[in-house]
Image (cartoon, rainbow, N blue to C red):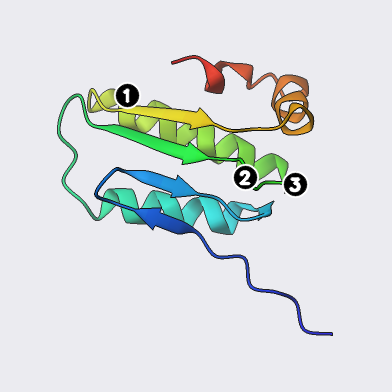
C-alpha cells in the first residue's frame, strides 16, 4: 500500500504554512527551509496552521519551537494556530505550550 504524501500548503503572500495530517521533523524542516529562503524583515509574521494535524512527532514539535526562537532573533514572529485539543496536549506534555503564546 502506497503511503499518501504529506505536503505542506504554503502561501507566502500571507506567510501561512498549512501543515499536513502527520507532522514529522521532515515536514517542519521543509517549512524552515522555505522561510530561510526568503528575506525576513523585522515584524514579519509567519503562521503555522495545525488545523489538519492529527499526529505530530516529538522532534517535529521541538523544531517548531526552534523555528519560533530563530525568527524571534530577527524580530519576526511565528504563530502556531488551529491545533486541536489532542495536539495541544502533546505540546503541553513536551513542555512546549509556549508555542501558542503570541
Residue 51 lies, with reference to residue 30, above or below; the image says: above
Along the line of sight, the residue nearer the viewer: 97 or 86: 86
Q: Nearer the viewer, mark 2 or mark 3?
A: 3
Q: Nearer the viewer, mark 1 or mark 3?
A: 3
Mark 1 burial class by Cα count in 10 Å: few <14, some 14-19, many 20+: some
The residue drawn where x is 59% and y is 40% is: 50
- Which residue is at the far bottom? 1
Along the line of sight, the residue nearer the viewer: 17 or 65: 17
Q: Is residue 99 left or right of residue 95?
A: left
Residue 14 on image: x %, y %:
29, 43
CA distance separating discs 2 and 1: 19 Å
CA distance separating discs 2 and 3: 13 Å
Contact flag, marks 2 and 1 (Cβ < 8 Å): no
Q: Is residue 10 left or right of residue 60?
A: left
The residue drawn where x is 60% and y is 35% is: 62
Q: Earlier in the sequence, mark 1 or mark 3?
A: 3
Residue 44 on image: x %, y %:
22, 31
Mark 2 burial class by Cα count in 10 Å: few <14, some 14-19, many 20+: some
Q: Which mark is residue 60?
A: 2
Q: Which mark is residue 54?
A: 3
- Which residue is at the far right? 1
The residue drawn where x is 38% and y is 44% is: 16
Q: Secondary structure at mark 3?
A: loop
Q: Which mark is residue 59?
A: none
Residue 79 lies, with reference to residue 67, above or below; the image says: above
Q: Earlier in the sequence, mark 2 or mark 1?
A: 2
Residue located beneath label 1 in the image: 72
Amino acid at each position: 500500500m502506497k503511503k499518501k504524501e504529506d505536503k505542506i500548503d504554503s502561501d507566502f503572500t500571507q506567510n501561512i504554512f498549512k501543515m499536513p495530517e502527520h507532522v514529522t521533523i521532515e515536514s517542519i524542516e521543509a517549512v524552515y527551509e522555505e522561510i530561510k529562503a526568503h528575506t525576513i524583515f523585522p515584524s514579519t509574521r509567519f503562521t503555522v496552521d495545525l488545523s489538519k494535524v492529527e499526529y505530530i512527532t516529538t522532534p517535529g514539535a521541538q523544531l517548531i519551537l526552534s523555528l519560533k526562537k530563530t525568527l524571534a532573533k530577527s524580530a519576526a514572529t511565528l504563530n502556531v494556530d488551529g491545533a486541536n485539543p489532542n495536539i495541544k496536549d502533546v505540546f503541553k506534555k513536551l513542555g512546549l505550550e509556549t508555542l501558542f503564546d503570541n
